[in-house]
Image: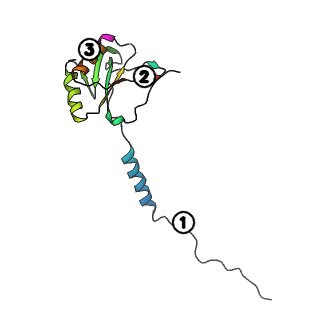
Amino acid sequence: MAHFQKKQAGSKQEIPTSAMPDVVFMLLFFFMVTTVLREVTLKVKVQLTQAENIEKIEQKRLVSYIYIGPERLPNGQLGEDKVQIDDSIIEDIGAIRTIMYDKLLEEQRMIVSLRVDEESEFGLLTDVQEELKQASAFRVNYSTRREN
């Protein structure tokens, strides 16, 4: 009586992994290109006010932010209200005119977004608005949170 043996394949089938480093590199490159890191370190505390009707700005690269709020001190306390543009606190309010005028020369479609703490004094905000008028920065908006 003959014994039949089932023929087995001589080679194992494996998943090809030779292209895996290329795929990983492409994913890494994609995330490096599309990720934008936060560029500004906040030195003032900003708790935005709430509003019902808000509009989202689609082109964020045209927006230049001005932060107004109490200064964060090293021991965790809050100081007087200050104005922050980019990473620096502006001590002289008149310097806002020069800074924003220079930014306006670089990008004429620039929108100035004021991020004001809800407990800040209105006089400082008025002074900043006056400096923006002097710098011919007329495209101004106010950042708020959506009211629940």
Q: Choose top left, top right, bottom left or bottom right for residue 101.
A: top left
**Picture layout, residue 126 above or below residue 103:** above
x and y percentages locating residue 26 in the rendered image? 41, 55
Which SS class for mark 2?
A: loop
Marking on residue 15: 1
Asked whether residue 137 appears in the rendered view, the answer is: yes
Amino acid type of the residue that numbered disc 3 sits on in the rendered structure? Asp
**For residue 11: magenta?**
no
Amino acid type of the residue that numbered disc 1 sits on in the rendered structure? Ile
Mark positioned earlier in the residue sequence (2 or 3) = 3
Question: Which region of the structure is painted magenta?
Answer: 120-124
Marking on residue 127: 3
Q: Nearer the viewer, mark 1 or mark 2?
A: 2
Which sits in the foreground, 27 or 74?
A: 27
**Picture layout, residue 20 above or below residue 49:** below
x and y percentages locating residue 39 in the rendered image? 32, 34
Amino acid type of the residue that numbered disc 2 sits on in the rendered structure? Thr
Which sits in the foreground, 93 or 108?
A: 108
**Picture layout, residue 28 above or below residue 77:** below
| Separation of marks 1 and 2 at Cα, in angstroms | 53 Å
The secondary structure that most of the magenta stretch takes on is helix
